[in-house]
Amino acid sequence: MKRKFLVFLLPLIGLAFAFTNLPGLKPTVRGNYPSNYFQAPVAQALLLSGTFGELRPNHFHAGIDIKSARGIIGDAVFSAADGFISRIKVDKSGYGNSLYISHPNGYTTVYAHLDKFKQEIEQWVKNQQYVQESFEIDVDLTHEKFPVSQGEEIGKMGNTGSSNGAHLHFEVRETSTQNPINPLLFGFRVVDNIAPKMHSLKVYALNEKREELGARAVSLYKSGNTYRVKGDTVLLDAGQTGFGLKVYDHLDRVSNWNGIYELVVYQDDSVIYDFTLESFAFDETRYINAHCDYEERVTKNSYFNRCYSLPGNQLSIYRRKANNGVIDLQDGQASKITMVAADVAGNSTTLEFYAKLKPNAAVLAQPIFNQKYNYVLPFNEGNMIRTEGLYLHMPSGTLYEDLYLKYDVQPERSSNYYSKVHRLNNNRTPVHDYFDIGLRPTQSIPAELKPKVFVAYCEGSRILNCGGRWEDGLLRAKVRDLGAYAILMDITPPTIRQVVFGQNMKGYKQFSFKISDNVASSPNVEPLTYEARVDGKWVLMEYDKKNGTITHYFDGETITPGEHEFSLVVRDAVGNESAFERKFFR
């Protein structure tokens, strides 16, 4: 085996300029980034629970996640360099409490999920919230407002927004484009002596349009420093084949499975596929659903890097894609396949195997599909379907590959349904952009109840309010998933539950409530809105969406000692309303 490895290594030495991820060599980097300009944004060692570019639902991770030193909120967060706070955002989801600092060297650093801002900023933000009468704010600032120095404390590490534990999400962006760049290319010290680990290989039989005809997983085992397959050979079911690889990076002193930096695929020592997670644009991040095996992600929460390109994938992370990463073999042919995965520290792992076409396998590569379908929707064209009960319009670019759409209509499921159930394939096919859907009701809806109906995504037991507007007798909405849709009605008001509130609030630091609704909403539909007033004046209630909790913190100024009248109104996406009114003493 050792002699075999040496024979394989010799041709690669001549490819050193094209392939720089062999052990001990630097990873491929296109840009020239300053390595001693920024300091770490925390005082402790950088222990990462998330790396740049790792695969997440519907997006690439745009920064690094730095663990709390104590595992709880409150660690000090510092400015990585001189500059000024150019943006402050408070969001009930997403990045939560976040600061953006612009630096004179052309980069912007981002600090997200903060628990608190430093006092001066905290007070200014609170004033803005009262001016705007909104918990959520997003404000751009000029350099005069909040200049900061390198190492200056700007806030405390937290767990706000769409966060699942105390940590700092830290980004470095190019200021002019706001494109995020891998922060670990800027010289931050992270101890990493562990190479990525490969977990599984997936083999896709393709036709000439790169459409999947079948797929199967292949187990891997490690032999020395190299991963292999049983028998060293993978027999292919079709003359054209693509591969997918489940691989994760690991770092010293943490147990997290993080994302890799680079993956290079060779066929007979020639590069056919190469991606690096150095930088990307936010408007392309959803192409992750073409990069990964989407069905594996939604059905098993399993992430495979697709090592060939779908026709509609426009990601910029690919450096080289010979034949779009597809292995093309004829009867009797075999190729040596080598996959090398590397982290940003230069640790790399190799998978080696031979790919050989099964006898007479090419006959399987005909464009034959196991499921029946009604429509073929080309990925690079606009598509429209009109039936008696359905209107569907998908602009060009909505799909990553041609869609063989199975459409059927099912009866209403209950008295709450005001249309038939229109099934558009299933949720295992990714969609890139929002598309228009319109449904025709099957029964008359009283005028006073029309605002209460909505286009519902009703896949399995999951119901999502996708919004709705009436046009030409159809209830229309913008959606971004395939599956089952129907018109539903919601006349149930939201729920308000006291958590900390009573007639006597003397000695309390805050009061809080839980608010919830019976129907969840799609990302483009506002689920719940609320408004709290004391003695008729708007008061700030901070919204923790993860727990469905809104809280007012007494500050000694907004609510003075004495008797007060409190009112809270909560509305759902279709306008159902609940109110809570009580007197209290402070």
Image (cartoon, rainbow, N blue to C red):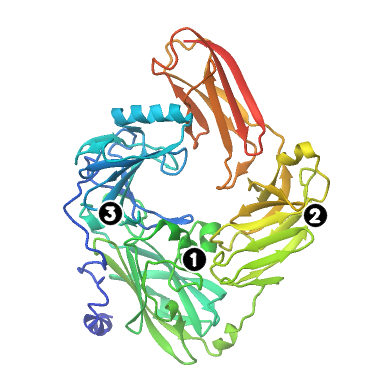
- Return the residue nearer the eye: 191 or 85: 85
Instruction: Farthest residue to the bottom: give it.
Output: 332
Residue 34: where, in percent of width, then height? Answer: 19, 56
Q: In this view, does 437 lie above or below 270?
A: above
Q: Can residue 384 be seen in this view?
A: yes
Residue in the image at 27% along x and 52% along y:
107
Label at residue 34? none
Mark 1, residue position: 290
Mark 2 vs 3, N-terminal side: 3
Residue type pointed to by label 1: Ala
- Confirm or deny contact between disc 3 and disc 1 (CB under 8 A): no
Is 325 left, or right, of 85 in this rendering? right
Mark 2, residue position: 411
Badge 2, how many Cα within 10 Å: few under 14, some, many 20+?
A: few
Q: What element carries label 1?
A: helix
Badge 3, how many Cα within 10 Å: few under 14, some, many 20+?
A: many
Q: Can residue 192 be seen in this view?
A: no
Residue type pointed to by label 3: Pro
Residue 453: where, in percent of width, then height? Answer: 72, 43
Tell me which corner region of the image, top left, top right, bottom left or bottom right, holds residue 230: bottom left
Mark 3, residue position: 183
Residue type pointed to by label 2: Pro
Q: Indicate which label's residue lies in the foreground, 2 or 3.
A: 3
Is 151 left, or right, of 164 in this rendering? left
